[in-house]
Image: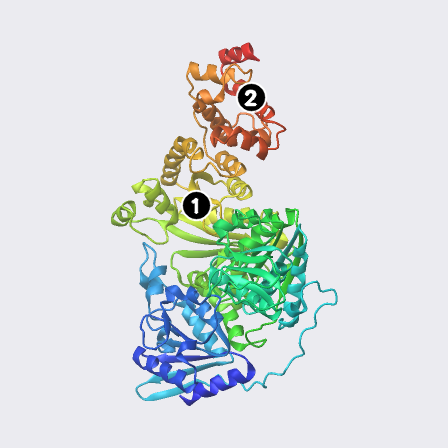
Amino acid sequence: MDHARSLRAEARRSNERRMLVLAGDATRTRDRAAAALDAAEIPREETTLLGPEDFLDCERHEQSRASELLGRTRSAVVLDCQDELRPNALGTAVGAVDGGGLLVLLTPPLESWAENRDAFDGSLAVPPFGVEDVTGHFRRRLVETLRAHRGIAIMSVDESGDTIENSGLIGPPPRRPTAPPVPPEDAAFRPEAYDACLTDDQVTAVHAFETLREAGNAVVVEADRGRGKSSAAGLAGANLALDGRDVLVTAPQYRSAAEVFVRAAALFEACGVTFEGDRSEDPHELRVVGSGGGVGRVGSNEDDEGGGDSGRIRFAKPAAAVELPEDPDVVIVDEAAALPVRRLESLLSAPAVAFTTTVHGYEGAGRGFSVRFRDRLAESDHEVTDVTMTTPIRYADADPVEVWAFRALLLDARPPVEPLVADATPETVEYRRLTSADVLANEHLLREVFGLLVLAHYRTEPADLARLLDAPNLSVRALTQDSHVVAVALLAREGNLDAETRATMYEGGRVRGNMIPDVLTTQLRDEDAGVPVGQRVLRIATHAAVRSRGLGSHLLDEVRAEFGDETDWLGVGYGATPELVRFWRRNGFSTLHLSTSRNDTSGEYSAVMLDPCSEGGRALADRHTGWFLARVVAVLSDALSDGDPDVVRATLRAVDGASSLDLSPWEWRLVAGVPGGAAILDTDPAPFRALTIRHLVAPDDPDALTDREERLLVRKVLQARSWDSVTAELGFVSRRQCMRALGGSVERLTRLYGEEWVQEELDRHT
């Protein structure tokens, strides 16, 4: 395998990566992989194998556990695709290879790879479709990019020998030394921090972190992988600790933030500062003991002469970090895009806070940060400093493997530029039915479609591209202006399940790709929910330049016109916000369910809404509407007691039909006695809850109460929150004022919905 030696030598000389594709049967390609690593002189301890068989004496993980490589660098990663290719594992493998390293891909013969059906394809074959219905377009496109890009060697391996199809050698000039970055003249951090920076981008980022020395500031650092943002956070966090600050670091997992602590410890040593760690490896806390004197290593208890306890930098998991334990001075959130928006928002209570986030993550970029959280950050009391880092550190700029990965996995997919769609209106756009073959044949169309879909979701992974191209239950519909995508919807066919599949689902078995039938069957115990066929809107997005022109609604109208005669329902499930609930309600969808646990990604409670298209769909919707109204009161005072009152109001207002208000004479007398103080709510909250639900679901007069008064009813009556917490949250001067406001709201609803004798009862006490 002399060729592998040449690839590695060129990669090291240029500080770039190279890829070696070994195509053939499993046994031969695995043997050649071992020989290639030996020839390239890559130690096994610097190698990771992602695959099902342990044929190399090195670290190994199944592709499903490729995330073990996140935040780490390796000299070589071998991705064994003989049995299956998981797109997410491919993306993670690319991101883990260091400059001068090799990514080795083991595949079946490339000519037939797209026709094979592997385990990942099986995951796309959702009932009632079979694996034979999966298209293979993703791998077909992948092979085309492998053959077209620089820096990728392709070697066919068969019984007749090895044949080099592409050499992958591009003869780049050796890397040239660059001048060290220059520290800013007004730097407040230690000079050793800027000496440790490897690029001007890192200097800029560390300098931005200096604003966190004062409360009321926030920093956002955005970068692709390998740009050194975590290192910059570590250098800054260490400086803040040296200034006596208590710095709390959080991330999805500790391994994501490990580099922060490595850089912090290195800076303490460079500054000659004694520090203590809570453990010798993977420290979760570094505490500064003093300056001057000796240097205490991580895990030591060595005291500095004359030094006292000072600042510290410590890690907490996100669930604990949102409580701001021990009142930190500064919070640093690494890989912020991977955290739910709700948790990010909670961290804004810190005096000063920084967020570092990956723009195009190989394992999937989270868009909840940019789609939702940035607006909330802008509305906060923090002065925000933004930094973008573009220069790679772990490998040279324009690394050919990174260039290939961005194209192959569409990591940098973008909607069309604004001038191309700026004039679009519902009257000027064209409705298009885009097959996977259509977008596969038109790279610009594919990038525009996928770019808009990325912006429509909290988290998009390379596997989503494979689903778009291959999954038989998915379809794409778009509005285009002069062939450029203005709005796009990704639809999933669900339902039409046979009796055996429905029974499996009802009994707790996993049935892929049928989210709405699954929720209605397993959680809500409706075994017939999988009989009707529907189209679920997985994602819908409109170009930012033409929002608020009715294009999203126009697209849904076109979808309804196309599918209305062949489907029983259109549906949607999503992390509920008041704005989104109102959008779907305006477009004819009604609430059937509000989840009792928060979505792991969005941090919101998920709503399920339906727009019936047939008698069967209407029967399904009516059945679940009744059940929802029957149980929602109990759920709101229990599992949903912390739900956003505006989400509760919006989801109830989006229910089709009116809730019955069948109160007994005694219950009406109790309700009528509260406004004048003759009765109290706590005697029996049930009639007050029924009255509130009646008004929020189908008000006779939508303007009878203000938004604040409706929030008061949700918090106190439906969610049974304490008077003190409601008083504080809704800004009442006192508990007494809050109680009077509730009485006034009850009085107006009683006059609106009570019979004449109830009005007379009310007048006796007011």
**Mark 2 neighbour density, 10 Å: few (under 14) some (14–19) many (20 or more):** many
- The residue at the far right in this view is 185
Q: Is residue 413 visible?
A: no
Q: Compared to 1, does 58 lie above or below?
A: above
Q: In which quadrant will I find the C terminus?
A: top right
Residue 731 x %, y %: 62, 32
Q: How many marks?
A: 2
What amino acid is labelled 1 in the image? Gly
**Disc number placed over residue 662 in the picture, else none:** none
- The residue at the far front in this view is 305
- 210 vs 414, nearest the viewer: 210
Name the residue beneath numbered marker 2. 743
- The residue at the far left in this view is 500
Residue 514 x %, y %: 36, 50
**Mark 1 neighbour density, 10 Å: few (under 14) some (14–19) many (20 or more):** many
Q: Compared to 320, does 752 lie above or below?
A: above
Q: In which quadrant will I find the N terminus?
A: bottom left
Q: Residue at x 44, y 72 (%)?
A: 142
Q: Which structural element holds mark 1? A: strand
Q: Which structural element holds mark 2? A: helix
Name the residue beneath numbered marker 1. 571
Residue 223 x %, y %: 58, 64
Q: Compared to 658, does 486 lie above or below?
A: below
- 53 vs 156, nearest the viewer: 53
Q: Is residue 123 left or right of residue 434?
A: left
